[in-house]
């Protein structure tokens, strides 16, 4: 990955976090929203932004609200980030942390069932 893309990726991640922390004026967007990763394509046409939403019941509706506000978020990030052009933002739901937590819970159950030696 080139230095330019790395810098743009870091700037976009910081900008999206700032914009989301200020909140959106959309009732669908609620809960704890975390930007888990940003990946910019080498041709800088798209930026894939993975987000995690808690509680789990609100994640689909929140993702839909954020995706609908994607052009507004991009414009706000454009005012923060110094770049001639910004890639299109594609928001995706990141469920890795939830899967990892479920695996850890299952391992704890197995460990609790194991007889002491």
Image (cartoon, grey):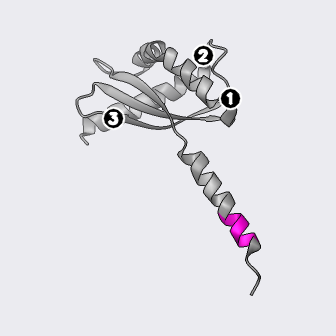
Q: Which residues are magenta?
A: 107-112
- Choose mark 1 or mark 3, whichever is in front: 1
Q: Is 25 rendered above or below residue 45?
A: above
Q: Secondary structure at mark 3?
A: helix
Given contact means CB atoms under 8 Å apart, are the residues at marks 3 and 2 in contact?
no
Q: Is residue 72 above or below residue 13?
A: above
Q: Is residue 92 magenta?
A: no
Q: Which mark is residue 31?
A: 1
Q: CA distance from mark 3 to mark 2?
A: 26 Å
Q: Is residue 99 above or below residue 11?
A: below
Give the mark nearest the N terminus, 2 or 1.
2
Residue shown at 69% from the left, 69% from the top:
110
> Which x, y percent locates residue 30?
67, 24
90 with respect to 93 (left or right): left
* Quarter the N terminus occupies: top left
Front residue of 102 and 51: 102
Horizontal and vertical percent position of residue 86: 33, 20
- Residue 2, label in figure: none
Say left or right for 17 vs 44. right
Picture quadrant of residue 24: top right
Mark pair 2, 1: CA separation: 12 Å
Q: Position of residue 104 (x, y in %)?
A: 64, 59
Q: Earlier in the sequence, mark 3 or mark 2?
A: 3
Residue that mark 3 sits on? 7
Main secondary structure type of the part rendered in magenta: helix
In the figure, residue 111 lies in which quadrant? Answer: bottom right
Q: Nearer the viewer, mark 3 or mark 2?
A: 2
User: Which label sits on residue 24?
Assistant: 2
Secondary structure of residue under mark 1:
loop
Q: Return the residue nearer the eye: 101 or 76.
A: 101
Residue drawn at 62 percent across, 19 percent down: 23
* Quadrant where the C terminus is found in the figure: bottom right
């Amino acid at each position: 990955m080139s230095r330019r893309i790395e810098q743009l990726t870091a700037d976009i991640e910081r900008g999206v976090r700032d914009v989301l922390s200020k909140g959106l004026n959309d009732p669908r967007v609620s809960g704890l929203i975390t930007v888990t990763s940003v990946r910019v394509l080498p041709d800088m046409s798209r930026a894939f932004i993975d987000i995690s939403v808690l509680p789990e019941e609100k994640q689909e509706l929140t993702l839909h609200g954020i995706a609908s506000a994607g052009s507004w978020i991009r414009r706000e990030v454009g005012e923060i980030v110094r770049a001639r052009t910004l890639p299109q933002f594609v928001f995706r739901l990141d469920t890795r942390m939830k899967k990892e937590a479920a695996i850890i819970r299952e391992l704890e159950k197995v460990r609790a069932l194991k007889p002491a030696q």
